[in-house]
Image (cartoon, grey):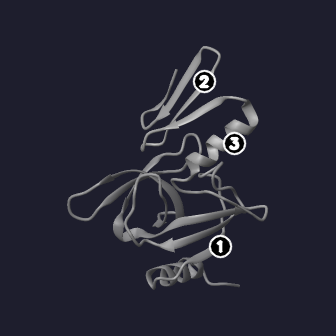
Amino acid sequence: MPRPGLFRDLCTQLLRGGQPVRFRATGSSMSPVLCDGDIVTVAPVGGGVRRGDILLYDGDRGLTAHRVIGQRTGGEPVFRVRGDAIGSPVELVEAGRVLGIVQAVERGGRRVCAGRPFVRQVVGLLRKSSGLLIRVAGSRNRVKLWRGRVRLSAGSRGITS
């Protein structure tokens, strides 16, 4: 039987040593982007962390992958993170607890996007399934949807109609 914490220790050593890791995810806090059983590839933090990245960090419940929704600077950076699932609470994560950034997610043998490119994946999915006219506008990845007289705008402050 493996000793507790072996997975955490191995991931920590590899990522802090500059090596990527690949593992099967468990849990549902990042659904629908990351689902239970998905294969996740995490790379060491290289060029910095930006809003929209999915961080792998050493949390109270073990290794956790959640999306960056904000950052506090001044001294050591502290990241505001939250799971993508509805009702996920916001957590504060010190930069020293961050191990890496999710680079890829595989589901059913196919690669799906995970970080900032996820907006493009959502737009593609909506185009195929709903017949909505969709336009991605600006550098902030704002998505505008039109159908009849309904106009929705999903931006950094939520969805409005």
**In this view of the protein, which residue sits in the foreground, 18 or 135?**
135
Percent of width and height locating residue 110: 75, 62
Look at mark 2 in the image and give the residue it sits on.
Answer: 146
Q: Left or right? Give the position of 90 relative to 28.
A: left
Look at mark 3 in the image and give the residue it sits on.
Answer: 125
Q: SS of the residue at dot 1?
A: strand
The answer to the question of whether label 1 and label 2 lie on touching residues, with beta carbons closer than 8 A, is no
Q: Can the viewer see residue 62? A: no
Q: Left or right? Give the position of 85 relative to 76.
A: right
Relative to 134, is 4 above or below? below
**In this view of the protein, which residue sits in the foreground, 129 or 92?**
129
**Quadrant of residue 146 in the image?**
top right
Q: CA distance from mark 2 to mark 3?
A: 15 Å
The local crowd at label 1, few if under 14, some if 14 to 19, many if 20 or more residues have their Cα within 10 Å, is some
Please tell me which residue is depicted at 48% across the width and 46% down the height of the picture: 89
Percent of width and height locating residue 145: 59, 28
**In this view of the protein, which residue sits in the foreground, 6 or 125?**
125
Please tell me which residue is depicted at 43% across the width and 71% down the height of the picture: 45
Q: CA distance from mark 1 to mark 2?
A: 39 Å
Amino acid type for the residue under numbered disc 3: Leu
Screen quadrant of the N terminus: bottom right
The local crowd at label 3, few if under 14, some if 14 to 19, many if 20 or more residues have their Cα within 10 Å, is few
Percent of width and height locating residue 87: 55, 40
**Quadrant of residue 111 in the image?**
bottom right
> In front: mark 3 or mark 1?
3
The local crowd at label 2, few if under 14, some if 14 to 19, many if 20 or more residues have their Cα within 10 Å, is some
Look at mark 1 in the image and give the residue it sits on.
Answer: 23
Relative to 80, is 160 above or below? above
Percent of width and height locating residue 150: 59, 17
Relative to 49, is 158 above or below? above
Query: Residue lying furthest right in this view?
Result: 108
Amino acid type for the residue under numbered disc 1: Phe
